[in-house]
Amino acid sequence: MMEIQILDDFNLDRIADSGQCFRWTKDDSGGYRIIHKDKLLRIRSLENGIFALSCTEDEYLRIWHDYFDLEEDYRAVRRRVKQEEDPFLAWACERGKGIRILRQDPWETLISFIISQNRNIPAIKRSVELLCESAGQRREENGCSYFLFPGPEKILSMSDEALAACRLGYRCRYVKAAAADVAEGRLDLERLRYASEEETIEALTGVCGVGIKVASCVSLFGLHHVDAFPVDVWIRRILENEYPDGYPKEKYKPYNGIYQQYMFYGYREKYGRK
């Protein structure tokens, strides 16, 4: 167990509720159990920006510091937006303060967002966990068992019945198609980390069942292209209501994806829970 102090924006609840991650589970302490690649972390907020983490300092520096994107100054990103120039986005930045774009595994992100189509977050999380329990490797740590996210070969080895049991519905064939593309080298996710956004979207939408919205989510949340700007029903509503003359993407480069998260969180909090 170790403690760290984070002076920049960092709010566990807001990150967990931002729609970008599906393997965060809140525990009785008010903290979270997080599974990332082959590691499990328990983290909770104490006070004055101090957080308790269930890992060694070495593991934190090797894995979790990068996962939480702690090299990026999110306060500085927020402060680029001026109240007098864009009052809506300034409001959204304040409302969503504490959200960070996690550096997640691109393969897991791709499959998770294929699964996410036309579903709510609890249903997505349940299907992801069923998939991990069905095909992922089981691990034990400090008396806690958990499952790793299965790789493409593992998913390809699953029967149609086993995939259907994960409550994937019509998405079963899309998940298998993505697994085949990655396993057989037609889709190189590591290369896309460094590709242009145009090239990234073109490659991802070449996967059966992946449209522009899912591709944009994978670009932002899995490849850490923080200028990617996914448009779902909430963002479409924001663009129509708050930016009838057009959202100024050029003005807010290269952080449009971060601003998208602030807008998404703020609007959903204000209008989606009534």
Image (cartoon, rainbow, N blue to C red):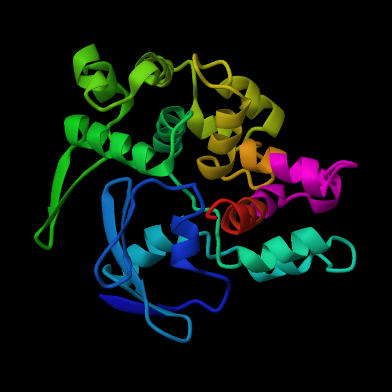
Relative to 4, 99 lies left or right: right
**Residue at image location 48% in from the left, 81% down from the top:** 49
Residue at the image point whose x is 41% and y is 14% from the top: 177
Quarter location, residue 219: top right
For residue 24, above or below residue 83: above
Q: Is residue 56 shown to the viewer in this render?
A: yes
As for residue 3 lying within the magenta part, the answer is no
Q: Is residue 62 left or right of residue 200?
A: left
| Nearer to me, 164 or 69 | 164
List x then y, in percent, for residue 10.
Answer: 52, 69
Measuring from the top left, give residue 247's x and y in whole percent: 83, 44
Residue, far left: 143
Nearest the camera: 104 or 61?
104
Quarter of the image where the C terminus is located:
bottom right
Question: Is residue 159 visible in the rendered structure shown here?
Answer: no
Instruction: Classify residue 184 as left or right of residue 55.
Output: right
| Residue situated furthest front in the rendering | 274
Q: Quadrant of residue 204?
A: top right
Q: Is residue 204 above or below residue 73?
A: above
- 45 up-or-down from 144: above or below: below
Tag count = 0
State the image quarter where residue 244 is shown: top right
Residue farthest to the bottom?
48
Q: What main secondary structure does the magenta stretch of the protein show?
A: helix
Residue lying at 30% horizontally and 30% vertically, measured from the top left = 151
Q: Is residue 182 above or below residue 119?
A: above
Residue 159 location, x and y as percent? 20, 14
> Where's the N terminus, which quadrant?
bottom left
For the point 27% across and 47% down, the residue is: 38
Front residue of this view, candidates 87 and 259: 87
Q: Position of residue 120 (x, y in %)?
A: 43, 39
Residue interval drawn in magenta: 237-260
